[in-house]
Amino acid sequence: MGRCGRQTIAGIPAACGFTSQPDSLPKPADLVVEAAHADLLKQVALRIVERSDLLLFSITALADEAFRTALEQTAVKCGRKVFLPHGAMIGIDGLVDAGRRSIGHGDHNQESGSLGLHRTKHTVVYEGPTRQACAKFPRNVNVHAAIALAGLGFDRTVSRIVADPAVSTKQPPGRSRGTGYRFRIEVSSEAGGKVTGAYTPQALSEH
């Protein structure tokens, strides 16, 4: 538990309190919106869905199969809903329609600053199953996690992560193909040197 002393979020009074213990809140909320980190989400999510619906942004946490199963079971048991926003990716409905019969590929091109890496040239830092990408870069590949959940799953979806100091936007195209069709979804979202691209909060505010 603490106080917003060192950093004040614009528009929120500095005197606002905060807590990492959701069961210490005076009363349950109708909806809790998580925008923190996959590790923190895994610590508090089960206690949240015992009392409230949950909208989570740290979708990479769901690559942990034990956590995902526990979250689903707790939500069903307590009659709560868990919402997954599409975040920086559009066209998720197309991936859901294609489903597990298609071949999916996630390709995330991202500046090295927001990856926490220091590369002086275009470098592929990971290529392989999305489940391992989520473990390596939990703050950066939530789009990959969303694509995996909508389509082939974490083990059959392939992630390619590039660190490029010349790139100032997060560019997460998603590709899928099946019998007689093929499509590519691409969004370019200015990151401004931070982890979250500009489109992600805009996507949420429209709903």
Image (cartoon, rainbow, N blue to C red):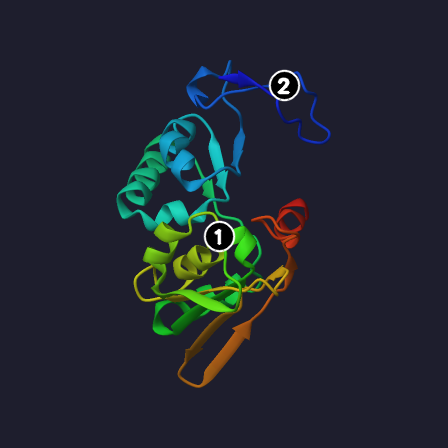
In percent of the image, x 50 and y 44: which residue is there?
57
Residue carrying label 1: 140
Looking at the picture, tell me which residue is in the foreground, 166 or 186: 166
Residue 160 coordinates in the image, percent (x, y): 43, 67
Looking at the image, the residue that sits furthest to the left is 66
Q: Residues within 10 Å of mark 1 (few under 14, many from 20)?
A: many
Identify the element where label 2 is drawn. Answer: loop
Q: Is residue 188 left or right of residue 125?
A: right
Q: Residues within 10 Å of mark 2 (few under 14, many from 20)?
A: few
Identify the element where label 1 is drawn. Answer: loop
Residue 47 coordinates in the image, percent (x, y): 38, 27
Does residue 36 appear anywhere in the picture?
A: yes
Residue carrying label 2: 16
Residue 158 coordinates in the image, percent (x, y): 37, 67
* Number of numbered markers: 2
Amino acid at circle 2: Cys
Give how far apart the Cα atoms at labels 1 and 2 are: 28 Å
65 is higher (above) or lower (below) than 30? below
Q: Is residue 2 left or right of residue 21?
A: right
